[in-house]
Image (cartoon, helix red, strand yellow):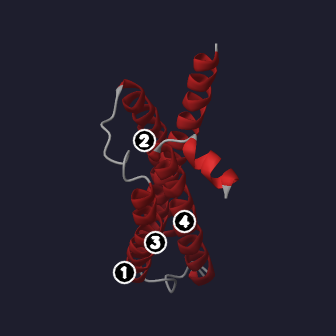
């Protein structure tokens, strides 16, 4: 238990939240991607219906958020509502920039796949997976930047 407390004690709520969102987004992207892959068939349009994919992502997002983010907020109730400072804003801005480029590239590839295959459901699924991938990139890059900032802040305090 002391190891867990030491890890939790040395990280901020925003960093923990970014790691949890990374795990959530990775899990949802994996579940959704495996469902699309299992139903894609011969690309003849008889794959997973777009509405079913949207329901799957919505339900997974809700369930994972309730069971992972809410306990994290309860665990960090003292620091969960702290306002963002300049460092936080810079970390968020850099994460959004990476997510923007990820989304732009993946949606462009989705449009190319649509032009080649002419299947509307495939376009929907690839664009939705692009959005999920961009969210994953945002959450993961934010978590990594918080970890790097925390390590540099800790070394600055020790000097």
Classify residue 55 as left or right of residue 155: left
Report the Cα–Cα distance between label 1 and label 2. Answer: 25 Å
Mark yes or no: residue 119 visible: no
Give percent across and percent down for residue 105. 50, 45
Q: Are marks 1 and 4 in contact (CB under 8 Å)?
A: no
As helix, strand or loop, the secondary structure at mark 4 comes to helix
Report the Cα–Cα distance between label 1 and label 4. Answer: 16 Å
As helix, strand or loop, the secondary structure at mark 3 comes to helix
Q: Nearer the viewer, mark 3 or mark 1?
A: 3
Residue topped by disc 3: 67
Q: Nearer the viewer, mark 2 or mark 3?
A: 3
Report the Cα–Cα distance between label 3 and label 1. Answer: 24 Å
> Closest to the observer: 127 or 45?
127
Marked residue nearer the N-terminal end (2 or 3): 3
Report the Cα–Cα distance between label 2 and label 3. Answer: 28 Å
Residue lying at the far right of the rendered structure? 3
Residue drawn at x 61%, y 51% is 5
Residue topped by disc 1: 51
State the mark number for residue 29: 4
As helix, strand or loop, the secondary structure at mark 2 comes to helix
Marked residue nearer the N-terminal end (1 or 4): 4
Report the Cα–Cα distance between label 4 and label 3. Answer: 17 Å
Residue drawn at x 49%, y 49% is 18
Residue drawn at x 49%, y 63% is 129
């Amino acid at each position: 238990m002391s190891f867990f407390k030491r890890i939790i004690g040395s990280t901020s709520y925003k960093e923990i939240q970014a790691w949890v969102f990374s795990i959530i987004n990775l899990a949802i992207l994996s579940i959704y991607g495996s469902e699309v892959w299992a139903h894609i068939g011969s690309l003849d349009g008889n794959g997973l219906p777009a509405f079913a994919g949207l329901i799957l992502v919505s339900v997974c997002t809700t369930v994972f958020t309730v069971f992972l983010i809410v306990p994290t907020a309860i665990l960090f109730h003292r620091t969960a509502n702290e306002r963002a400072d300049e460092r936080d804003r810079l970390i968020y801005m850099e994460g959004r920039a990476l997510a923007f480029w990820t989304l732009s590239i993946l949606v462009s590839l989705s449009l190319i796949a649509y032009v080649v295959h002419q299947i509307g459901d495939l376009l929907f699924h690839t664009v939705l997976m692009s959005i999920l991938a961009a969210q994953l990139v945002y959450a993961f890059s934010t978590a990594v930047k918080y970890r790097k900032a925390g390590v540099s802040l800790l070394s600055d305090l020790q000097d």
